[in-house]
Amino acid sequence: MANEKSPLKVYYNSACPICKAGIENQKGKIEGCPVEWKDVHINTQLVTEIHSEIEQVRERLHVVDEYGRIHIGFDAFLVIWQHSPREKWKAVLLGLPVIKQLGRIAYNLFAARLYKWNTKKKHW
């Protein structure tokens, strides 16, 4: 069908225990929307699908939406929440301009620290 949308593709790193727990939790919340969960720890070659490097995906969540657009970090979460019936409100609230900017800053700071922690703990 010409109007059929592609599934969301979520690229994440299960070697990070916090990331893995977050994704496992999210899997139970996103219903009625086809999602391909792509674990770059299990298959590092998956990053070539989004023309990225493994370290970039280890540090920040990547999502390809139903139109083929890539979203990274906080914006990736917004896309997931937009497609999760019980979390659409998060996408609306946290997607407001000022809140979205603050969310991006907070996410980037957290992701950088988490990446350093995971590297120090030799999770990969």
Image (cartoon, helix red, strand yellow):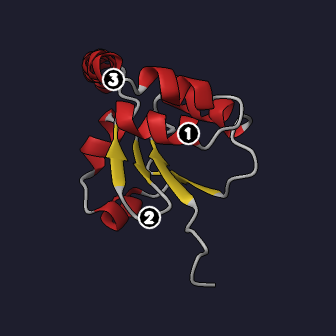
Give the residue displayed 39% in from the left and 56% down from the top.
Answer: 44
Choose the circle earlier in sequence order: 1 or 2: 2
Q: From the image, tell me which residue sits under label 2.
A: 67
Which kind of residue does numbered mark 1 sit on? Gln
Q: Secondary structure at mark 1?
A: helix
Q: From the image, tell me which residue sits under label 1.
A: 82
Say left or right for 32 vs 35: right
Badge 3 density bin: few <14, some 14–19, many ≥20, Cα 10 Å: some
Badge 2 density bin: few <14, some 14–19, many ≥20, Cα 10 Å: few
Q: Secondary structure at mark 2?
A: loop
Q: Residue furthest bottom?
A: 1
Which kind of residue does numbered mark 2 sit on? Tyr
Say left or right for 38 vs 56: right
Which kind of residue does numbered mark 3 sit on? Lys
Q: 60 or 8, which lies in front?
A: 8
* Whole-percent x, y for residue 118 in the image: 36, 24
Choose the circle earlier in sequence order: 3 or 2: 2
Q: In this rendering, is residue 105 above or below 92?
A: above
* Whole-percent x, y for residue 75 in the image: 37, 36
Choose the circle earlier in sequence order: 3 or 1: 1
